[in-house]
Image (spheres, coloured by chain):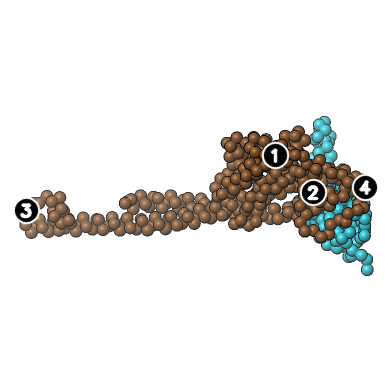
Chain colours: A cyan, B brown
Amino acid sequence: MSRKMRLEIVTPDRLEFSGDVESIIAPSVSGYIGILPGHIPLIARLTVGVLTVRTGTSRLTLAVSEGYMEVSPSKVIILAEAAEMPGEIDVERALAAKRRAEEILATSKEHVVLARARASLQKAINRLKVAKYKDGSGEGSPSVPEKIGRE
Amino acid sequence: MQSPREVGRHIRTIREIRHLTRAMKLVAAAKLREAQARVEAARPFARKISEVLLDISSFAGYVHPLMAGRPPRTVGVMVVTSDRGMCGRYNDDIIKAALDLIDRTSGRDAARVIAVGRVGARALRELGIPILEERSLVSKRPTFALARAIAARILKAYDARDVDHVYLVYSRFYSAMEQRPRVFRLIPIAPVGGSRTDRLPAGVCLFEPSAKEVVDHLVTRYVQVEVYRALLEAEAGERGARMTAMSAASDNASEIIERLTLTFHRSRQAQITREIADIVGGAEALAAEQFSGNSVPSTGAESEGA
């Protein structure tokens, strides 16, 4: 039996996840961090990226953006502006956002606009990446859906 | 006494008003459900941010200026009211709470208001309280982007030393029947953690990338989230207040209609009685005329009969 820790993922819209998990891999601003039960207390800023959570039987993959992770002895809290499971991601919308952002990056010269476009491009790419995990919930290495894989 | 026709017209008017208030009640009820779901969904996030901030503040070894605070020469107050009336005492309660707060702290001249909602902005401006910024929702639902813009305005005013302390005054949503004004001090920040038992132990804690950067970022986010929560609470409160007010208005309309209907029947009865009396009087006069064979003026006969 492996040890477990309590994880709560909260977004401004809802409590996205709450349960006992075995490991967490989160995208901090200075690189991905892995958390196992009994980790030293830690507070990290998170950035746009893929959050991977292992529970006893399955593996969850979420697309997160800007947020925080607090690791305390008894539990881990992840506060993120957005956290989406593969099934919740609207691939069409993410593709549209990606195209829009790329267009702006190619045409605009204003710093603020460019920065915003870069951020939304990052989020769109991240969502698309996570959306590929849709069928891989039980396996270690997720199968890539062919439709997106061929693109 | 009014004629039955007049009373009838009156009843129709009230009935139309009741249509209106009933429709407004239904609209408010539908929107209330949405608003309620949103505010309840947003509460955990606000609470967690507070908790994390509370943890950090106890041992980060770095105190953010917004947490340290400074003496309150001026007080900034964000007042959230509705854009429209027809919601009972909702706005009055909030404006009163805001005025109480201002009088208790800085006094009216040293207050700076950030008004969300037209009703509050107008009322406070008429009282001569300086308005720093005015926003209106125009009956649209509050977004996080709006909260971010307001938060940015508050922080800018703080940095420019336009405000030293900042309070949020809004209606806290409890249920459709109950909303109470809540006065919350946003700056200096004193996060409320409630009765949390699983606090981080004092001592070693890692920060990624650094304590200062995490705290700076978290403080900004905290301000945004609290503003957002205030907007959502206020929206749900407003819908609830409007629903209750319109429900009471519909009930009152029904009561008035009932009373007027009674008046209508009475007045109609009186008219019928009067007409019958006229006819009977006329008939008697005719009978008297036939009997005597004289042509008596009808007015005379009536007065005789009466």
| Residue B116 screen position, x and y as percent | 65, 42
Question: Of B29 and B172, which appears nearest the observer?
Answer: B172
Residue position for label 1: B75
Query: What residue is shown at x 88% (from left), y 65% (from top)?
Result: A57
Please rate how many residues cluster around mark 1, counting C-alpha atoms within 10 Å: few if below 14, some from 14 to 19, many from 20: many
Closer to the chain start, of discs 3 and 1, is: 1
Q: Is mark 1 on a helix, strand or loop?
A: strand
Q: Residue most toward the left? A: B293
Query: Can the viewer see residue B45?
Result: no
Mark 3 vs mark 4, foreground winner is 4
Residue at point 92%, 60% (across, down): A37
- Both labels 3 and 1 in a single chain: yes
Q: Which residue is drawn at 88% across and 54% down?
A: B202
Nearer the viewer's eye, disc 4 or disc 1? 1
Alpha carbon separation for disc pair 3 and 1: 96 Å
Q: Can residue B184 be seen in this view?
A: yes
Residue A81 is tagged as 2
Q: Which numbered disc flags the more N-terminal residue, 4 or 2?
A: 4
Residue position marked by numbered label 3 in the rendering: B294
Chain under callout 3:
B
Q: What residue type is labelled 2?
A: Glu
Label total for image: 4
Q: Which amino acid, mark 1?
A: Val
Question: Residue B50 at what x, y percent from top left?
Answer: 78, 51
Q: On the same chain: label 4 and label 2?
A: yes
Circle 2 chain: A
Mark 2 residue element: loop
Left/right of residue B121 with respect to residue B15 in the rendered view:
right
Amino acid bearing label 4: Gly
Looking at the rendered structure, whether the residues under marks 2 and 3 are on a common chain is answered as no
